[in-house]
Image: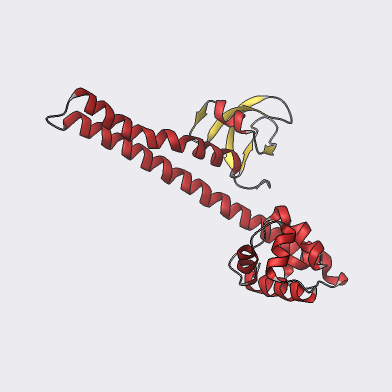
């Protein structure tokens, strides 16, 4: 999707409706800075407010994602194109989130190991000081764990080994599941069978 084109289209439609950026933002319960970012092509509207935004601008979501009013004869073609583009962008965003998860985990482990090495080999340290150093290295990893688990839950999907169903599990299911890397033993919501389910980025099966 062309964010610059979409931004210009939002700006044109907003002015056509006689709204300022501040007025549009107020109606959507967001900041006018967010509207400004859309109109300059720096970001896209969140999916949670797209329908409200389109209602205020008197356009369809397909028009919005195309950056122009789509004629009826091209409607299905443009809709399919926009859906595929959104799917591609979600997969890329999920891939980047999983990379962030790895980076955060590695940094947390490095800090923990660094603290353990300092506590073990530094001279002239009291026992309580060694304990404090180890705990200082452990705390960042403990703080990062919920964040990493949230990424595990939200980014991509898990595929049931029994029936092939792909889904987003609950945070509780991810948190309590035994795991090896990104493969977790969970109960499938479709077939209700437990299996070792692998992480995948797409709902579509190759």
The picture quadrant where one finds residue 38 is bottom right
Q: Give the x, y percent position of residue 41.
A: 61, 70
Q: Is residue 99 left or right of residue 60?
A: left
The percent coordinates of residue 156 (x first, y second) are 60, 44
Q: Quadrant of residue 160?
A: top right
Q: Measuring 73% from the left and 58% from the top, which residue is drawn there?
A: 28
- Front in this rendered view, residue 40 or 108: 40
Total number of numbered labels? 0
Q: Residue at x 32, y 39 (%)?
A: 111
Q: Is residue 6 above or below residue 198?
A: below
Can you give x and y, in whole percent of width and height, for residue 74 in the image?
Answer: 83, 70
Q: Nearer the viewer, residue 21 or 143?
A: 21
Q: Quadrant of residue 18?
A: bottom right
Q: Is residue 161 left or right of residue 133?
A: right
Q: Residue at x 23, y 33 (%)?
A: 117
In this picture, residue 158 sits left or right of residue 192: left
Judge left or right: residue 28 versus residue 110: right
Q: Is residue 196 visible?
A: no
* Front residue of 31 and 43: 31
Residue 157 visible to an observer of this rendering: yes
Give the quadrant of the N terminus. bottom right
Q: Residue furthest left?
A: 124
């Amino acid at each position: 999707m062309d964010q610059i084109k979409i931004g210009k289209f939002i700006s044109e439609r907003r002015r056509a409706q006689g709204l300022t950026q501040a007025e549009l933002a107020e109606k959507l319960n967001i900041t006018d800075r967010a509207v400004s970012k859309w109109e300059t092509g720096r970001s896209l509207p969140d999916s949670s407010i797209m329908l409200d935004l389109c209602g205020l601008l008197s356009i369809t979501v397909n028009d919005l994602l195309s950056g122009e009013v789509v004629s009826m004869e091209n409607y299905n073609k443009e809709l399919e194109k926009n859906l595929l583009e959104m799917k591609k962008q979600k997969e890329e965003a999920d891939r980047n989130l999983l990379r962030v998860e790895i980076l955060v985990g590695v940094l947390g482990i490095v800090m923990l190991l660094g603290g353990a090495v300092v506590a073990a080999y530094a001279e002239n340290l009291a026992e309580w000081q060694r304990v404090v150093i180890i705990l200082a290295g452990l705390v960042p990893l403990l703080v990062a764990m919920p964040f990493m688990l949230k990424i595990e839950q939200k980014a991509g999907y898990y595929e049931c080994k029994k029936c092939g169903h792909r889904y987003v599990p609950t945070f509780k299911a991810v948190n309590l599941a035994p795991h090896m890397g990104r493969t977790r033993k969970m109960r499938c919501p479709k077939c209700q069978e437990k299996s070792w389910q692998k992480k995948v980025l797409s709902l579509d099966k190759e």
